[in-house]
Image: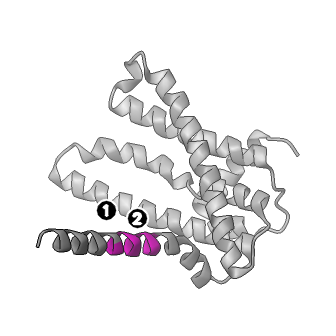
Amino acid sequence: MGITTNNFFENIYSVIFSPKSFFEREDITISIRLALATIIFISVINKLVAGIFDKSILNLMFIPSLIWHVILTIILWLLTALFFEYIAKIFDRSGNLNKLLFFTAFAPIPYIFYAPLNLIKHSGDLFYMISVMFEIIIYIWIICLYAMSLKTVYKITNARAFMMIFIPFISTFFAIYWMICFCSKIWYIFSM
């Protein structure tokens, strides 16, 4: 099954308005091309909308910047999927990389709402607070979509899906904490 406009926009619509039914569908065809098209679509829409709002679209370097943005988004998508696949080995659930790539491509769809919030953000203090509040809601929405995709791919509970998402953050926090403690001890030793 190739990429058709109906599948593409139906999937995006489904993720936005009924994500649970999208991630739990049994008849879905896993297509890496459709996932890649979704990632490129999200990346281009975000960059174009942001470029229109901050007028960088008129800049001569906008097209190379757009291409670079798309390439980095694809690399980040691949690295995120590989990282989740690696974390899944902790739960003995790895081996579903194609399915993971497909479902995680649809998780960042709410980012398309992020760019218009930047327009509101610079309209005053009240609008800044409203914009930040909606950005937080969008981030939570995206985390929930990632959890749904992990739950679908690896057949795990919601708690384990959220653990897979937050393990890197918790690990990074402790690594930074230990590094600061280590450096402060070294500083203390050599400052005597």
Which residue is at a point 54% across and 40% down the rendered structure image?
Answer: 72
Q: What residue type is labelled 2?
A: Ile
Residue placed furthest toward the left: 192
Of helix, strand and loop, which one carries label 1?
A: helix
- Give the image location of residue 152, x and y in percent: 72, 72
Tell me residue 136's x, y (percent).
37, 63
Q: Is mark 2 on a helix, strand or loop?
A: helix
The stretch in magenta equals 169-178
The residue that label 2 is drawn on is: 137
Residue 59 found in image quarter: top left
Question: Is residue 149 at all visible to an observer of this figure?
Answer: no
The answer to whether residue 25 is magenta is: no
Image-based side of 124 in relation to 158, left or right: left
Q: Nearer the viewer, residue 165 or 146?
A: 165
Give the amino acid at mark 1.
Met
Tag 2–tag 1 contact (CB < 8 Å): yes
Residue bearing the label numbered 1: 133
Report the predominant secondary structure element of the magenta stretch: helix
Q: Identify which residue is drawn at 24% across, 71% down.
A: 186
Label at residue 47:
none
Q: Which residue is drawn at 44% across and 60% down?
A: 138
